[in-house]
Image (cartoon, helix red, strand yellow):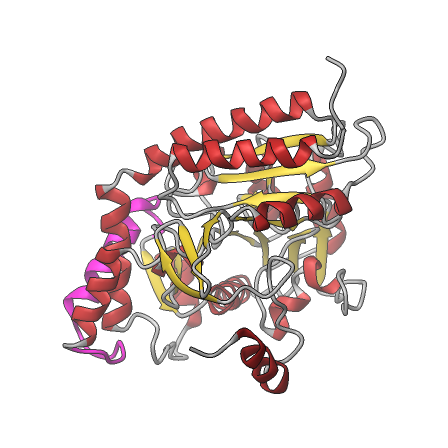
Amino acid sequence: MTNLSGLLDARNRHISKALSIGHGKPLHIVRGEMQYLYAADGTQYLDLVNNVCHVGHCHPKVVAAGQEQMSKLSTNTRYVFDGLTEYVSRISATLPDELCVGFLLNSGSEANELAVRLARAHTGNHDMVVIEGGYHGNTSMLVQLSPYKFMGPGGKGKPESWVHVVPVPDVFRRKEFDYGEEINQVIKNAGKIAGFLVEPLLSCAGQIPLPEGFLDAARKYTHKAGGLLIVDEVQVGFGRVGTHMWGFENQGVTPDIVVLGKSIGNGHPMSAVFTTKEIASSLGEMEWFSSTGGNPVSCAIGNAVLDVIEEENLLKRASELGEFFIQGLKDLQEKYPIIGDVRGRGLFIGIEFVHDRDTLEPAADEAARVIREMRDSGVLLSTDGPLHNVIKIKPPMVLTKEDIDMTLRLLNESLGRTGDVSAE
């Protein structure tokens, strides 16, 4: 087996520094099993951030489905095969009736790019609206559409003229605001728009659930300006919120276009766009095609992921475990003032660290220290948000209560070492 120093030497020679290493130090991971990752030295890590392997690392049912199909047929979608129509039909059945036409692709970036293309083709407009802190993909166009990138390190610091940014609807840091009116004003200033691209729970912006009524206002003002509401479910879909299959369902709003990715293939490169027949037809006579999107192996894997979600009742599991996890974190919040906020739904959770609960001064260094200590204790976490002070939790959905108990115990030990305990 190649030693770590040799791997790092090769990485430094051949892999761009733009691809960073996670968790603060190089981890030589050689195997994954359900909610755990295993290093070359035998260390077991509880993975609390890998929302790609949605139903567990190397879930045996998903692995078997891919292996079996790979031994039979893997080709493009210009042929008729059962797996393709079955898979698209099954996804469509989980969505509102009108969202009945699907496009299968290979990544969330491809899917969001297609969603924007559909919106522009359908409306005849060009400008787009996004939320501050949002991230939607790594293509050139999507980097321009992602404040998380263009306002972050290496970015231009301001949006392109065709990109219009709505402030983050953060009820922890911005309590007394009319978020709907903020949407209205941004869109009114933009004029005609092609669409509003928004996550139903904000991920890179800091693990923030949208305030009640936000998506309804987004749809109302977007439609008024001639645009389409595009919901990006790449990080939060497929039952992670627990109460529903899709995050947008929490707000009782039907978008015009839905984008799926990451968890759709449990680590296999898959994504999808679902929309109405009318919007889908807006591409006109220009053919749409993806060489590997929707190939038989991908469809077999996608069907297996849906099987596991149904057979293992993972929505209920996410709801129950999420409630237990959040309550345990709120108990820690009462004990440690450095925890300013605990928020989320299901197994999509954020813990915001602050030095002062009145000024809300971010405690990014402390959040980073806790993450390092948790890593050294065998639990993988990471930070997110524009202030880098929000610990995010988006684990494989096969997490157990025992995993959560261990995590809460280790967090308590780490936080206790700060001496930041309330007098209560």
Furthest toward the top, the residue is 424
Q: Is residue 358 left or right of residue 175?
A: right
Q: Is residue 397 left or right of residue 125?
A: left
Residue range (magenta): 73-99
The verdict on residue 104 being magenta is no
Q: Position of residue 9 (x, y in %)?
A: 60, 82
For the point 53% across and 29% down, which residue is it?
Answer: 326
Quarter holding the N terminus is bottom left
The answer to which of 349 and 11 lies nearer the viewer is 11
For the point 72% across and 44% down, which residue is it?
Answer: 389
Quarter holding the C terminus is top right
Q: Position of residue 360 (x, y in %)?
A: 80, 33
Residue 209 visible in the snapshot:
no
Q: Is residue 7 left or right of residue 266?
A: right
Q: Position of residue 298 (x, y in %)?
A: 29, 68
Residue 173 visible in the snapshot:
yes
Q: Is residue 63 left or right of residue 229?
A: left
For the point 34% across and 50% down, which residue is it?
Answer: 55
Number of numbered labels in the structure image:
0
Furthest toward the right, the residue is 359
The answer to which of 306 and 32 lies nearer the viewer is 32
Furthest toward the bottom, the residue is 13
Q: Quadrant of residue 299?
A: bottom left
For the point 74% across and 42% down, which residue is it?
Answer: 366
Q: Position of residue 65 (x, y in %)?
A: 20, 63
The answer to which of 49 and 135 lies nearer the viewer is 49
Identify whether 58 is placed above or below 289.
Answer: above
